Image: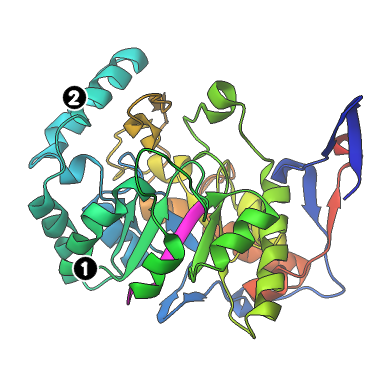
């Protein structure tokens, strides 16, 4: 991609958000009933290419079970309130009654409680016993201490998730997590991210990860761009990671690493464009926080509130839109774009002529002239 001159001595690539793109219809259309939304990672098959964000406002053990029953993947954050408090529901109810500033302060108080290993095992066992795929998320700095409890609980997938994750973290204070060695020693598939560049995605793939999560910052209620100045337009980030996947596919002799897009997606059209850019699945936060069953109870906050020195997550009001099933599968009488997301994706694929997600990844896209 051509670079533009920012000023003497500095140039930069032009990046594109999903809003700048449109999917080009192919020479055929399809019956929506003939379109498949299935997605597989390792030994696990899902009917929907949707993963819940590992955020307390989105995913509780109960909503992870509901998500699995619907056909997607629910991911519980092991460092959240579910692993720190025996009865988190009244605490989340309290948060929902506060204004944004007070809610943010109260959340940070709740996260000062220690993580209790017995609660980690208890919550994940609840999900496993329900018969759905059990996925748990940790920040890189907590993986060594807590992953044995995930294994004890029988977790199927480990998600190593943070604002930005690299394969080469450096520190003079502590011994950093060696992702390649750690992942190589595990018997469970690992998803790792966020990342937002070709080189970082390629390095993460070389660690042996089953999937990389693309996107810096969690999207909703995130102040990473404002506080840190760090951020990459989503369409470009996904396309770069998809390019890294092709490079790694060649150098590894055929090992396919999945790309999961996370950040800023609110509608079925956003999901369709993310997949057209090369994503295999999407990780959703605010759209699922709008569910009646969501533990945030009309609010959303990112797990960046856990940062000890520079907490960045804020509490954000999210109007309740419908049940989790209505948001993902419908039916709905009026669709503002944020309901029946799977139906919208299916219709987008049928309209543009693609029968599978793999086919949609090869779709032509156009950039609006005002975005160039």
Residue plotted at (29% across, 14% down): 102
* Image quadrant in which you'd find residue 183: bottom left
CA neighbours of label 1 inside 10 A, class few (<14), some (14 to 19), many (20+): some
**Relative image position of residue 233 (x, y in whole percent):** 69, 41
Residue plotted at (27% across, 56% down): 144
**Relative image position of residue 317 (x, y in whole percent):** 41, 25
- Quick check: can you spot residue 71? no
Would you say residue 183 sits in the magenta stretch?
no
* Image quadrant in which you'd find residue 129: bottom left
- 242 to 195, vertically: above or below: below
- 208 to 149, vertically: above or below: below
Residue plotted at (84% across, 70% down): 26
Give the residue number, with chain letter if any, for mark 1. Answer: 151
Give the residue number, with chain letter if any, for mark 2. Answer: 94
29 sits left or right of 325 in the view:
right
Magenta-highlighted residues = 186-193
């Amino acid at each position: 991609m051509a670079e533009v001159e920012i000023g003497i001595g500095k140039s930069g690539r032009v990046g594109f958000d999903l809003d700048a793109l449109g999917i080009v219809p192919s020479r055929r259309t399809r019956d929506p009933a003939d379109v498949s939304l299935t997605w597989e990672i390792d030994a696990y098959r899902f009917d929907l290419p949707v993963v819940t964000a590992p955020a307390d406002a989105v995913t509780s053990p109960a909503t992870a079970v509901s998500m699995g029953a619907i056909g997607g993947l629910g991911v519980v954050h092991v460092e959240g309130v579910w692993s720190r408090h025996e009865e988190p529901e009244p605490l989340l109810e309290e948060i929902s009654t506060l204004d944004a500033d007070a809610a943010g302060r109260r959340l940070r108080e709740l996260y000062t409680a220690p993580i209790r290993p017995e609660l980690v095992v208890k919550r994940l066992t609840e999900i496993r016993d329900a018969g759905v795929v059990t996925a748990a998320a940790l920040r890189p700095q907590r993986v060594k201490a807590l992953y044995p409890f995930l294994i004890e609980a029988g977790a199927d997938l480990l998600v190593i998730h943070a604002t930005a994750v690299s394969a080469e973290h450096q520190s003079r204070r502590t011994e950093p997590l060696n992702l390649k060695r750690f992942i190589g020693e595990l018997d469970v598939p690992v998803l790792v991210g966020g990342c937002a560049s070709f080189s970082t995605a390629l390095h993460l793939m070389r660690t042996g990860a089953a999937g990389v999560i693309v996107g810096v910052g969690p999207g909703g209620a995130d102040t990473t761009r404002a506080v840190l100045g760090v951020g990459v337009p989503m369409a470009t980030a996904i396309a770069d990671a998809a390019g890294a996947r092709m490079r790694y596919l060649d150098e590894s002799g055929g090992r396919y690493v999945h790309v999961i897009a996370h950040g800023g997606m609110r509608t079925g059209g956003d999901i369709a464009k993310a997949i057209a850019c090369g994503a295999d699945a999407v990780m959703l936060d605010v759209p699922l926080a709008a569910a009646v069953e969501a533990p945030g109870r009309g609010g959303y906050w990112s797990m960046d509130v856990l940062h000890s020195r520079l907490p960045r997550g804020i509490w954000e009001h999210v109007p309740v839109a419908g049940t989790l099933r209505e948001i993902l599968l419908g039916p709905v009488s009026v669709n503002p774009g944020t309901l029946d997301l799977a139906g919208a994706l299916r219709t987008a694929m049928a309209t543009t002529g693609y029968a599978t997600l793999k086919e949609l990844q090869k779709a032509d896209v156009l950039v609006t002239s005002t975005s160039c």
